[in-house]
Image: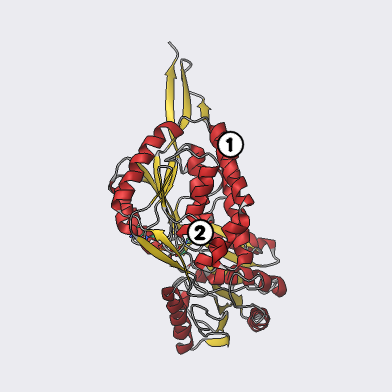
Amino acid sequence: MTTQVLDYPTQAYINGQWTSTGRTFTITNPATAEKLFEVTDCGAPQAEAALQAALEAQKTWRKVNPFERGRIIAKWAALMHENSEKLARIMTLEMGKPIIETRGEVKYAASFAEWYAEEGKRYAGEMLHMPFDHKRAMVRYDPVGVCYAVTPWNFPAGMVTRKVAPALAAGCVMVLKPAEQSPVTALYLAELWEQAGGPEGTFQVLPSLDPVPVSKPFIDSADCRKITFTGSTEVGRILFTQAAQTLKRISFELGGHAPFIIFPDADLDLAVKEVMLAKYRNAGQTCVCVNRLYVHEDIAEAFTAKLVEKVKTLKVGNPIEQTTSIGPLVEEQGLRKVERHVQDAVEKGATLDFGGESLGGLFYSPTVLSNVTSDMLIMNEETFGPVAAITTFKTTEEAIELANNTPFGLAAYLWTKDIATGFKVSEALEYGIVGVNDGVPSAASPHVPFGGMKFSGVGREGGHWGLMEYLEPKLVSYGLY
Ligand code: NAD
């Protein structure tokens, strides 16, 4: 199987050149433990070289006509579609997401390049009225400058294009350090950028086993004007502090701990259908995945029974197979966290309705727990695994309070037939994304703002909000003498 896909680039992509360092690290298939690739391991010297190349490229890319930039970015998107199966396979092989989902991720990743290829043409600036007859004022949108991106493994293509496409469209250049678990997807995206005619130094990729030395030159340099990061809140906090030294612009998409509230008037079959997607896709390893299910006490038993019936139909297996709905967890550490959360819940009195066992290798059975209480780990930390934790509530006020009782604020969901409840609860939830009768919110589109409040992040990706993250509004004031 792997012999068919080994023609992926595995060297660093620096200033338009595929570059070796003499050091490599191994990418292993989490489903089979098979060794897939030896990938070039970058350190500080490669980061310095990429920074210098980025500074040089920035001088010209910012002046390239936005229509021409858009043409190259659109070509990049077209190449993602043309090579869709190859991109999907590499994601599945390196991080274990089922192939039926990675095919969707290719479309999602390409959609950002398509959207920003157009959006970049629309944002020139604004003319302003002035309170003086002899003055005029204009706001120009200038590119922020050289940007540095750090991305996670759970959406190896989507998290890259969600940052790189708006940056390039805005006239910024980008150096990317992809997650050490899934760098080959990012390198393949760089190859497609090269094929699209992307000029050297505009998009560079530095795979590295150790993120610290490779990040340091960008963090330390005042010439790197922005850090954009998607990953855990813990690492986000470190980078936030470091970026403060040179007062960089930042965009941080961090961890979630999503609640899903089900009111007593909900259509239970529909709610269960959406919980299945909101909880179990990517084996629960998605930042907007449901972590806490708050079900009204009158319907909790019926809901749990229906959910268990559906969960029993999930097929755990090798993610490269079409019929697999749950693949492995990405690594040992993630598996241990899931085991710890389930064990802690059961020890503290939760009911194990289904699953709850390691299946060998990095596989964990899709699991349903009920009678979960707020003192359990699973109700306080992001699990990042295929475990649904159900608890009950009595009143709407109680549900809102429980849902908001967390430092995280990325995604939240609620299910009701009552329009007033939908409005009131969505307004009260302290989250950047709220799905009302929608378990996979329209957030999976390139034109809407995606991001979190509180410990879930700073800034937004997607739409014009995502473009503005890479633009500096510059006031130009004219005196008409
Ligand atoms: P992680 O924070 O461990 O790693 C993310 C990236 O940061 C990786 O590339 C890693 O190499 C790098 N990194 C780690 N330590 C670093 C350091 N000291 N300096 C510089 N870079 C460093 O997160 P992960 O396990 O890869 O991803 C899972 C997390 O990402 C979850 O918490 C999930 O909720 C979050 N996430 C958030 C979003 C969102 O849009 N809000 C999307 C996807 C994932």
Q: Give the class, few, some or many, for how many residues have Cα within 10 Å of label 1's Cα (few <14, many ≥20).
A: some
Q: Is mark 2 within 8 Å of ligand 1?
A: no
Residue type of the residue flagged with mark 1: Arg
Name the residue carrying label 2.
156
* Circle 2 SS class: loop
Name the residue carrying label 1.
71
**Furthest residue to the top?**
481
Q: Which is nearer the eye, 268 or 2?
A: 2
Colour pattern: secondary structure
State which tag comes first along the sequence, 1 or 2. 1
| Residue 74 in sight in this render | yes
Q: Is mark 1 within 8 Å of ligand 1?
A: no
Checking the image for residue 171, the label placed there is none
Q: How many marks?
A: 2
Residue type of the residue flagged with mark 2: Pro
**Furthest residue to the front?**
3
Which residue sits at x=51%, y=75%?
A: 32
* Circle 1 SS class: helix
- Residue 127, position as x, y percentages in the image: 52, 26
Would you place residue 141 above or below residue 284 in this image? above
